[in-house]
Amino acid sequence: MTRIVIAADSFKGSATSQQVGEYLTNGIYQVDPEASVVTVPMADGGEGTVASVLAALGGERRITRVTGPVGQPVDATWGWLPDQHMAVIEMAAAAGLNLVQPDYAPRTASTYGVGQLIDAALTAGATTIYVGLGGSGTTDGGAGMLQALGARLLTATGDPIPRGGAGLRELALVDLSGLDDRLARVNLVALTDVENVLTGPYGAAAVFGPQKGATPEMVQELDANLTHYQAALAAQNAFSLSCPGDGAAGGTGFGLRLLGATLAPGTATMLKLTQLAAKLQVADLVLTGEGRVDGQSLMGKAPIGVAKLAHAAQVPVILIAGSVGDDLAAVYAAGVDLVLSSTVAPMTVNQAIAQTESLLMNAGATAMRAYQLGH
């Protein structure tokens, strides 16, 4: 009996990590109905983080209504593991890019709902809270999150600054005395695989602002506002002005550090949380994958983390991707034994998305046949 672990990330816009695992499993069973398949959905701190942890460790899927990035009510999903007093939050669930589309709101989108999710986790009794920082639609430095947790960020006239990155320019007074005192008793961990600082040419606005609809003029404005915001908070809290990771999620990494959070690598932390290493000890084959693989996949992507872990355990790895780009030599050097494209004929992206299930089933079958060739 062949023992297979499937630890794939989502195929963005096509299938969740759970669905990818299901489709690949069905393909494997077409070739080997007796195979033993264990699915461990993967994520790197962005979309799918909650589902990945809950699938691996159990727990409860909870929904909290929060204020969305442009003020609308949003029902945000998060994970609660009562036995461990641990909560898992995806920032995107409360302030994600999908929640500001199609018009975007680069100047006014707020992280207020993220603070409300943290508050919900604290109220549940969490002693550890993981916050995945992927997929945000905001550039407010986490200011809205701080406000939701009791911080007073005030204008010169004593009014709360407007929400969003544009409002940061009006910040004249910082009062953190009202911050929720439960934060001092919780282990807060922010998951990110970017090392951008808060401001400057490699900062939150310059690098990620255009992805959130910011024009070049808006990028300059938001960067200047984040600089002003950083200076105001740094003066009070003796913060480093250039901590890698501060620029994650539109500067929310910086805001979370102010709350006492540790910035941790998303993929590596998720591999530990899902206890993947233990599952690999009894595996004969690992399948991983994501929507696209190329040289950029080496920059903290979950499938490469899976491959490295499997390589260390001397388990062969097949990586399945919707599209395959350049620099595969580096991907193979990272521990992947075979890269397969699930798209095997010329087709548009929309056509591929429409056929995701059948394409991944076929890829699962092909991967199983490739493994059998070597055994």
Image (tube, rainbow, N blue to C red):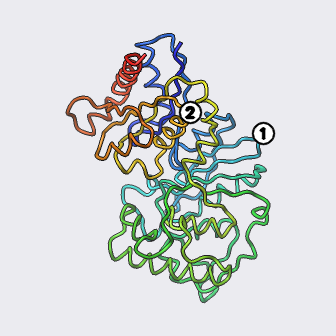
Q: Position of residue 29 (x, y in %)?
A: 45, 15
Residue type at numbered disc 1: Asp
Residue ID at (41%, 20%): 371
Give the structural element (helix, strand or loop) at label 1. helix
Front position among marks 2 and 1: 2
Q: Which residue is mark 2?
A: 313
**Residue at figure coordinates x 46%, y 34% from the top left:** 288
Q: Position of residue 1 (x, y in %)?
A: 54, 12
Report the disc number at residue 224.
none
What secondary structure is found at the residue carrying circle 2? loop
Q: Which image quadrant for residue 102? A: bottom left
Residue at 77% across / 46% down in the picture? 85
Q: Where residue 346 sits: x, y (%)?
A: 20, 33
How many residues crowd around disc 2 within 10 Å: few (fewer than 14), some, or many (20 or more)?
A: some
Q: Quadrant of residue 27?
A: top left
In x, y percent, where is residue 365?
A: 38, 19
- Above/below status of 61 relative to 184: above
Looking at this view, is 142 or 291 the one in front? 291
Location of residue 51 (image quadrant): top right
* Relative vertical location of residue 152 with respect to residue 272 in this rendering, above or below: below
Question: Can you identify the residue that label 1 sits on?
Answer: 83
